[in-house]
Image: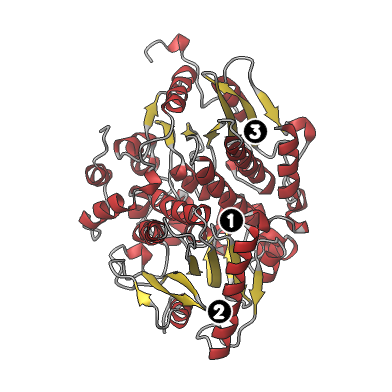
Amino acid sequence: MNTYSLRGLNWFNALSAGAKPVEDLPASLKVADGVLGNQPVRFIAVVADPENRFVRARNGEVGLLEGWSLAKAVDEVIAADVDKPHKRAVIAIVDVPSQAYGRREEALGIHQALAGAADSYARARLAGHAVIGLLVGKAMSGAFLAHGYQANRLIALRDPGVMVHAMGKASAARVTLRSVEELEALAASVPPMAYDIDSYASLGLLWETLSVEQIEQPTTADLARVTECLNQAIGDVAAHGRDLSSRLGASNRAASSKVRQLLRAQW
Amino acid sequence: MTDLLNKHSFIELGARQRAKALLDPGTFRELLDPFQRIMSPWLERQGVVPQADDGVVIAKGSIGGLPVVIAAIEGAFQGGSLGEVGGAKMAGALELAAEDNRNGIPTRAVLLLETGGVRLQEANLGLAAIADIHAAIVDLRQYQPVIGVVAGSVGCFGGMSIAAGLCSYLVVTQEARLGLNGPQVIEQEAGLEEYDSRDRPFIWSLTGGEQRFASGLVDRYTADDVAQIQQHVSELLQQGLPAQQRSRQADLYLQRLARLDAAPQIEPATVRDLYQGAHS
């Protein structure tokens, strides 16, 4: 029985079947160059490495090596396509339980490692690469900011195990001086606080949600459905641009639009 | 620094006063000021009293004659946490600064960071806003430097520490702390042995301003003095873009990490040695 999730790895393996693995990366990073439909893409997943030499990053957490290596894996794509008119897409397969919590991590500047990853994903987007985040498991906090949240389009599979949040329940309860039960009761009535993917979808941050038959280990039909959706997302980026404005517009995120509108008027 | 009578604490100032203190005299102009009462739509229903500026001050003006927008976080309101409105103010200001540059107006940005990161009462909207802030910093940085100041006493944590890591330059004081995870959360997740959240000297020795400067993870280390901080910010703005952004040095940091024996628990001196802080 594994204590860590294998979803990210399984979806990576399924989507990248036949793709060329990229070497010279830590075992916690899976990267491969392949095609999706007829488009060249790079698949990237952070997975659990029980032998990770940083002990606080053995369950699929995004730590120091993962942050900087994500940066490297994305930078390679930007550099390789710099002179090409068509930039290949980057598919971030997201199943990250958290950033790594540890003394070594803080001391060595894990914030800077995650900034490296966010920087590269954002620059890939600005350089014209479609960056698509595919949420197949947890997408938590700093880990998601480093791996996925800079995507042009976010796609989530519809499953109780797919969740986006700023902090795990136990820690969130401690920091806000509430019990876990109180936190859950509040989350049920305040959409941005909820842990389920439907509440998250109501914030307008997802481009699409998809149901699949077997979230843990995709079937052939699941793979076909997700592949088609990823291709549509890539096409949508080509048609509608590289910034994050498509995330604005939901009624549960109305203040984010209003603030921007007023700032522009007063600028 | 020796003349205490002429020294004015920056840390003791609120966000609005800090922004005023950095801008050239008479140039401060606040956008979405508190009288417009653009407040969090989420706090009241959770029994938290909202604030009229949601804890973020956006001000335009100039520093040394250069056009600047300042986004200053009020550490005294909800621990400087970013919710939907405050986060959108900061992201929106950075987005407009980048747009200015595309239109030939060389607006720079200065971020005054006193923040625990995401406001947990607005969890996913805070997180989304921080992703927008990251995107906007990287966008603006194509044209002009983005300068982060962490003065204290809150420090800079969570997703906003990643924002700090994206800044072109960082200025810190001894009182500042810069780290991804707050001490309480690390203790909660990893145990007291790993991280004792009540041991202040231990925490500062790892994440405090002096250590970050000695490790080359920030650019300027300054006394808590308005004039000195103003001078540092002004100099960095005049410098323009750095030769290499810190967040673009993956190869260098991976080489350094490869040299580390990660088995024993880490000491502050190990980090200084490994990162060969240019200023140690």
The residue pinned by badge 2 equals A227
Name the amino acid type tagged 2. Thr
Q: Who is closer to the viewer here, A156 or B39? A: A156
Residue A154: x and y in percent read 60, 66
Pinpoint the chain carrying mark 2. A
Residue B95 appears left or right of B139: right
Q: Is residue A67 visible?
A: yes
Q: Secondary structure at mark 3?
A: strand
Pinpoint the chain carrying mark 1. A
Q: Nearer the viewer, mark 2 or mark 3?
A: 2
The residue pinned by badge 3 equals B57
In this rendering, the answer to whether B172 lies above or below A45 is above
The residue pinned by badge 1 equals A242
**Which numbered disc, 2 or 1, marks the residue that appears first in the sequence?**
2
Measured in 3D between alpha carbons, the distance from the residue under mark 1 to the one under mark 3, in whole angstroms, is 28 Å
Name the amino acid type tagged 1. Arg
Residue A74: x and y in percent read 41, 60
Name the quarter where the N terminus of chain B is drawn: top left
Kindly indicate the quadrant of the structure image that contains residue B77: top right
Task: Kindly identify the residue that appears in the image at 41 percent across and 52 percent down.
Answer: A116
